[in-house]
Image: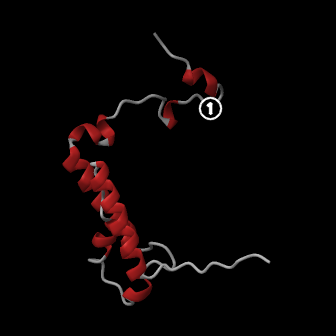
Amino acid sequence: MAATLTLDRTNDFTQGYADACIEVAQELEVPVVDLWRSMQNVEMVDRTNDFTQGVRGEGHVVDLRTLMQKVEDLGPKLLSEALPMHFPAWDEIDPNDPASSFVVKT
């Protein structure tokens, strides 16, 4: 007989998980983005079931803004424009001969 598991995605339970993630990041001295707290600033009708259906609507915008702010705070070298390209961009790949687009050119 298979065991059944009920997921608890309530706001209160999710806060505990978020707090544990932050604690581990601080112990390891690595940057962390507190998306849970940034989501608390989003106007929602029912805060008791925020995460039961995943993050939707304005939540995605908040996540992206919060994440990008953290990247900017850590330094411009982490911005996508500053990262080196290891592979060609999608529009630089020859559709008739894709393999040739991945050859190292000297």
Position of 56 with respect to 7 (left or right) is left
At 76% from the left and 75% from the top, the residue drawn is 2
x and y percentages locating residue 66 in the rendered image: 28, 61
Q: Mark 1 points at which residue?
A: 95
Q: Is mark 1 on a helix, strand or loop?
A: loop
The answer to whether residue 91 shows anywhere in this view is yes
Residue drawn at (22%, 48%), measured in percent from left and top? 72
Where 92 falls versus 6 (above or below)? above
Image quadrant assignment for residue 48: bottom left
Q: In this view, does 16 lie to the left or right of 79?
A: right
Q: Which residue occupies the foreground of this view, 80 or 15?
A: 15
Q: Extreme right residue here?
A: 1
Q: Which quadrant of the view contains residue 1? A: bottom right
Q: In this view, does 27 lie above or below 75?
A: below
Q: Which of 72 and 52 is in front in this view?
A: 52
Residue 39, horizontal then vertical, whole percent: 32, 73
In-front residue for pair 10/93: 10
Q: What residue type is labelled 1?
A: Pro
Q: Where is residue 44 in the image (x, y as percent from the top left)?
A: 35, 85
